[in-house]
């Protein structure tokens, strides 16, 4: 416990310091985010704050593993650190040069394959209601790759308000850590707490009013690490119901992305074309302030996290009912806010 506390403290301190460094470097290099019709901030804003998140996480993770006499750099952990570095570098390059989406996707795919190559992929599933274990073997590789790339981009897409992606990621990481501990997965839980600590160091400068943005170097890194540690924990070989747990914990980025894809496909727009129909845009269009919107999404994330924790404690049949109810609430809320309303989201937001 003391080692974990020291690792988290190190991650927090390094995250704080390196975020300040990132701010200075970004301003000197001209790595800034310019306002436009879709964005809500005004004036030039330095980005590349992901340097603080990445540096803090790496420092804390390496310290925790090296300081524990019974832990070694296993394939999963080594693969996580290598793959995270690849994703981070890809994000930094995009922050500086604005690379094409296909190039950015390629970097994520390489990172995912590195993680998979080190043994980090879903290998089997067990039926929670009884029956034989389903061995996925190599079929689990494409599932894992899609999961990692999907979560990375999901967190990237919700990074639209000061402190939003960072705060949601912190809540998700802590919730996932609690669930991991309940299943006896101590290493994934420790890494999640370290990630939360490093992101908290960044959030000190990113919460409204922000003085720096995380950029793709931060959002892609956060999403990838969250998705990868979910695989390292209860998703690597778990019941089918247990696989729903990370989906519930990461419900906001996952379903906001899902709704955006559906919305754009129906409107015959490119999937990667940004719009103002995301959850935070819709809440702002209702007249809520920037800070109120972020806090409401924090609350929703905490609510879904509580449901995820309950699924780890309840019988399988009750878990199925609880998950179904949670998904029903999500879709009803999306319909009420107009997130799936074709054509109306952009128009309403533009009139505000």
Image (tube, rainbow, N blue to C red):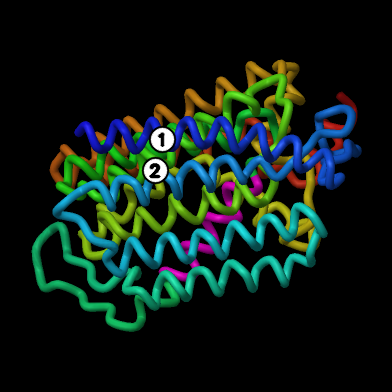
Left/right of residue 215 with respect to residue 274 in the rendered view: left
Residue at position x 58%, y 40% from top? 52
Q: Residues within 10 Å of mark 1 (few under 14, many from 20)?
A: many
Residue 136 is situated, as x and y percent measured from the top left of the image, at 28, 78
Residue 284 is situated, as x and y percent measured from the top left of the image, at 73, 24
Whether label 1 touches label 2, CB < 8 Å: yes
Which of the two labelled residues, at mark 1 and mark 2, occupies the earlier sequence position? 1
Taking depth in this image into account, of 318 and 191 the one nearest to the observer is: 191
Q: Which residue is mark 2?
A: 60
Q: Is residue 258 visible?
A: no
Left/right of residue 287 with respect to residue 258 in the rendered view: right
Find numbered disc 1 in the image and state the secondary structure of the residue it sits on: helix
| Total numbered circles | 2
Residue 20 is situated, as x and y percent measured from the top left of the image, at 66, 32
Q: Is residue 127 visible?
A: yes
Left/right of residue 180 with respect to residue 341 in the rendered view: left
**Magenta-tinted stretch:** 144-157
Q: Quadrant of the N terminus?
A: top left
State yes or no: residue 155 in magenta: yes
Taking depth in this image into account, of 249 and 319 the one nearest to the observer is: 249
The Cα–Cα distance between marks 1 and 2, rounded to whole angstroms, is 6 Å
Residue at position x 39%, y 67% from top? 79
Find numbered disc 2 in the image and state the secondary structure of the residue it sits on: helix
Taking depth in this image into account, of 34 and 79 the one nearest to the observer is: 79
Q: Which residue is mark 1?
A: 10
| Rendered position, 195 above or below 143 | above
């Amino acid at each position: 416990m003391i080692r974990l506390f020291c690792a988290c403290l190190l991650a927090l301190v390094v995250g704080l310091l390196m975020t300040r460094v990132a701010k200075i470097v970004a301003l000197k290099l001209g790595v800034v985010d310019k306002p436009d019709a879709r964005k809500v901030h005004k004036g030039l804003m330095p980005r590349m704050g992901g340097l603080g998140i990445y540096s803090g996480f790496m420092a804390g993770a390496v310290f925790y593993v090296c300081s524990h006499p019974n832990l070694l750099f296993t394939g999963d952990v080594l693969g996580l650190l290598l793959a995270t570095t690849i994703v981070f570098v890809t994000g930094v390059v995009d922050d500086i040069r604005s690379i094409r989406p296909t190039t950015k996707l390629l970097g994520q795919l390489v990172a995912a394959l590195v993680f998979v190559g080190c043994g980090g992929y879903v290998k089997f599933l067990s039926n929670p209601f009884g029956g034989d274990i389903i061995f996925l073997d190599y079929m689990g590789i494409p599932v894992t790759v899609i999961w990692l790339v999907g979560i990375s981009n999901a967190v990237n897409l919700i990074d639209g308000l000061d402190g939003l992606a960072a705060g949601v990621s912190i809540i998700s990481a802590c919730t996932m850590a609690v669930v991991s501990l309940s299943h006896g997965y101590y290493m994934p839980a420790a890494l999640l707490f370290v990630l939360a600590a490093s992101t908290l160091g960044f959030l000190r400068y990113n919460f409204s009013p922000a003085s720096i943005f995380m950029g793709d170097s931060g959002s892609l890194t956060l999403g990838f690490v969250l998705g990868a540690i979910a695989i390292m924990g209860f998703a690597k070989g778990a019941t089918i119901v247990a696989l729903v747990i990370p989906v519930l914990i990461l419900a906001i980025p996952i379903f906001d992305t899902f709704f955006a894809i559906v919305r754009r496909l129906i409107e015959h727009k490119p999937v990667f074309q940004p719009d103002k129909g995301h959850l935070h845009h819709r809440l702002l269009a209702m007249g809520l302030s920037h800070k109120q919107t972020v806090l409401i999404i924090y609350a929703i994330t905490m609510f879904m996290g509580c449901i995820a924790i309950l699924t780890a404690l309840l019988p399988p049949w009750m878990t199925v009912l609880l998950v179904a109810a949670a998904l029903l609430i999500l879709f009803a809320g999306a319909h009420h806010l107009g997130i799936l309303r074709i054509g109306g989201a952009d128009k309403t937001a533009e009139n505000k």
